Image: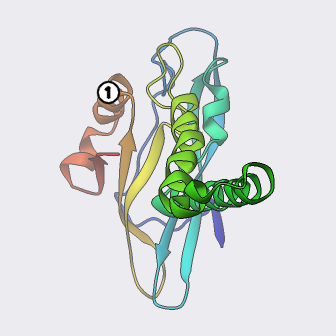
Amino acid sequence: MIEYSLGTLPFRDGVVFLFPNHLCCNCGKTTDLTTIHQDTRRTRYMLGGGTEITFKLPLPFCKDCAPTATRRPKSLLNWLLIFIAAFAASALALIIIGDMVLNSPLIARYLLPFSVMLAAVPCAAMVLLMRPKGKQTSYFQPVRIPRLKQEFVSGAVTAIGFGFSNLAYAKAFALVNREAIAKKLVTLEGI
């Protein structure tokens, strides 16, 4: 893992960007803002491993949205592991209940579909609990780095793309960084 703050990572000339600090990057609130260095990670997977670069992005958060700065978004692999764990627990519970308590051949016959249905319940509950609250646009980190171009040998960043969950903050970012965006050194990407 490589960890950089914005001041230590080598950037090529012209790859300069600023983050607006007049509104919350998640909900858009304009009062009681605090700058938090959001620990944003960009991971690239290769054949036998991968690399991870950590950026400390200085972003404005209101007190209600501050916890979102530490919540990394769940990947498909994370969700798959959660479902597999819920499935295994459901299957084990059905086996124990079916054999020891109910002595039911019905549970044994339909163990797989029952386990899938039971595993879907906690997964759906997690999705419902991870919905944005109030005017928040994301339960997770509202600013991400979906695109990063680097030189092969030096590792210097030649272009970077940011994704924003809040459209108003994305527009403010585009306004402040219009020169770098016009040169395609900084881009706005979808999340």
Q: Is residue 119 above or below residue 85?
A: above
Answer with left or right where residue 175 lies relative to residue 65.
left
Q: What residue lies at 43% left-to-right and 53% top-to-bottom? A: 145
Observer-nearest residue: 166 or 85? 85
**Residue 108 in the image: x percent, y percent?**
59, 62
Location of the C terminus by quadrant is top left
Q: Secondary structure at mark 1?
A: helix
**Residue 126 visible in rendering:** yes
From the viewer's perspective, tell me whether residue 134 is left or right of residue 171.
right
| Looking at the image, residue 12 lies above or below residue 189 | below
Percent position (x, y) of residue 76?
46, 59
Residue 140 versus residue 98: which sits nearer the camera?
Answer: 98
> What is the residue that sits farthest to the left in this orientation?
182
Residue in view at x 60 percent, y 59 percent: 105
Residue 140 appears in the picture as rendered: no
Residue on which the image places disc 1: 167
- Quarter of the image containing the N terminus? bottom right
Asked where in the image residue 28 lies, by quadrant, the reply is top left
Q: Position of residue 128 (x, y in %)?
A: 52, 30
Coloring scheme used: rainbow
Image label count: 1
Which residue is at the far top? Answer: 31
How many C-alpha atoms fall within 10 Å of the one at disc 1: few (<14), some, or many (≥20)?
A: some
Residue at the image position 54 percent from the left and 80 percent from the top: 50
In the visual, does 49 lie left or right of 171?
Answer: right
Q: Nearer the viewer, residue 117 or 151?
A: 117
Query: In percent of the image, x 63 and y 54: which residue is there?
Result: 86
Residue 135 drawn at (x, y percent) = 46, 14
**Quarter-wise, where is residue 106 in the image?**
bottom right
Query: What amino acid type should be assigned to the residue bearing mark 1?
Result: Leu
Compared with residue 3, is residue 21 higher up or lower down, i.e. above or below?
above
